[in-house]
């Protein structure tokens, strides 16, 4: 009898442990603090993915779009693709002696990138010269090598490690709930496609150019996303378009407020200006992620 009771007790104990383990919940967003921004995102996801919810959205319509520069990785002190182009100009300089006196290449050879800020025409010329003359495979191999080897001048880590860990977790969380995630990038599509799958688990075919963001998204996807993430006035049209659709919508701005771990800038910045979009977020009750307050950590450990 005693043996039987002991066996029953041990069996019940084992089952209890197994049951408690099977129902343990793993936090999908461990790098996020439990703030209003996180709660808004999680509440939205729960509502649109729970069957029976009045806000339920079928899986095919669960689409989220993300800006890249400033939203998924830093854009200071200048865009990472410009840093890549600068290195390419120096690498190719010996083949183009005329660049020593020809702008915008002369400025880059002097490492004077400040003169290029806001110069769309100059940037287009630089990208054209440094991104052409090779096959797509050759270009992407050069990009992959660069992004793994070259270190960010201030963060002192390879560019591939300058990713926002909270945003990586967020995209994984969304995909685990049936979302399809897209990158809407103002940078070169092929430059982004070279590393995006390794960095964020997003296949290269889900990278979209951002010329007229709503038009580019509609042409590429054929559906209006139900969630959009950006960080600057350049993302305002995308956020407005997504937020104005039918049903529950999520529009999120990443606000750079952490001077110590990253950068602090918004309205007066020449790069990633956040002015009109910040006002719109307040007026329309969009979610604004305060990097300093809402993120436990910024970059992968």
Image (cartoon, rainbow, N blue to C red):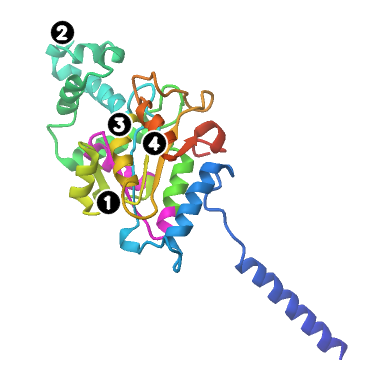
Q: Which is in the foreground here, disc 1 or disc 4?
A: 1
Residue 136 appears left or right of 197: left
Label pair 2/3, CB-CB below 8 angstroms: no
Q: Which of 139 and 275 lies nearest the eye of the viewer?
A: 275
Quadrant of image for the N terminus: bottom right
Q: Is residue 67 above or below residue 82?
A: below
In the rendered image, which quarter is residue 286 located in?
Answer: top left
Q: Tell which circle, 2 or 3, labels the residue nearer the N-terminal end.
A: 2
Label pair 4/3, CB-CB below 8 angstroms: no
195 falls in the magenta region: yes
- Residue at which label 4 appears: 71
Label pair 4/2, CB-CB below 8 angstroms: no
Q: Which mark is residue 101?
A: 2
Q: Which mark is residue 224?
A: 1
107 falls in the magenta region: no
Label pair 1/4, CB-CB below 8 angstroms: no
Q: Alpha-carbon distance for marks 4 and 3?
A: 11 Å
- Residue at which label 3 appears: 234
Q: Which of 112 and 239 lies nearest the eye of the viewer?
A: 239
Provide the residue span drawn in magenta.
Answer: 174-199
| Residue in view at x 24 percent, y 50 percent | 205
Q: Alpha-carbon distance for marks 2 and 3?
A: 33 Å
SS category of the residue bearing label 1: loop
Q: Which is in the foreground here, disc 4 or disc 2?
A: 4
SS category of the residue bearing label 4: loop
| Residue in view at x 38 percent, y 21 percent | 77
Q: Tell which circle, 1 or 4, labels the residue nearer the N-terminal end.
A: 4
Q: Position of residue 18 (x, y in %)?
A: 66, 71
SS category of the residue bearing label 2: loop
């Amino acid at each position: 009898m005693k043996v039987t009771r002991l066996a029953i007790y041990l069996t019940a104990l084992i089952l209890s442990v197994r049951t408690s383990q099977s129902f343990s919940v793993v936090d999908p967003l461990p790098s996020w603090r439990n703030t209003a921004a996180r709660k808004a995102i999680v509440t939205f996801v729960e509502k649109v993915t729970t069957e029976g919810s009045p806000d339920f959205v079928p899986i095919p319509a669960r689409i989220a779009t993300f800006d890249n520069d400033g939203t998924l990785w830093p854009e200071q002190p200048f865009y990472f693709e410009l840093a890549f182009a600068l290195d390419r100009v120096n690498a190719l300089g010996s083949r183009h002696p005329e660049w020593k006196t020809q702008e915008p290449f002369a400025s880059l050879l002097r490492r004077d990138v400040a003169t290029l800020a806001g110069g769309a025409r100059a940037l287009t010329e630089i990208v054209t010269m440094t991104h052409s003359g090779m096959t797509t495979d050759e270009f992407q191999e050069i990009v992959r090598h660069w992004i793994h080897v070259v270190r960010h001048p201030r963060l002192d880590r390879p560019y591939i490690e300058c990713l926002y860990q909270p945003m990586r977790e967020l995209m994984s969380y969304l995909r685990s709930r049936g979302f399809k995630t897209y990158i809407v990038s103002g940078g070169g599509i092929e430059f982004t496609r070279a590393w995006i799958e390794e960095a964020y688990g997003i296949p290269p075919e889900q990278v979209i150019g951002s010329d007229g963001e709503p038009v580019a998204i509609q042409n590429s996807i054929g559906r209006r996303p139900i969630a959009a993430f950006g960080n600057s006035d350049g993302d305002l049209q995308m956020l407005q378009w997504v937020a104005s659709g039918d049903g529950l919508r999520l529009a999120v701005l990443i606000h750079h407020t952490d001077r110590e771990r990253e950068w602090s800038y918004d309205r007066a910045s020449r790069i990633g200006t956040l002015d009109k979009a910040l006002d719109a977020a307040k007026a329309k009750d969009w979610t604004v992620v305060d990097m300093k307050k809402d993120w436990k950590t910024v970059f992968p450990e």
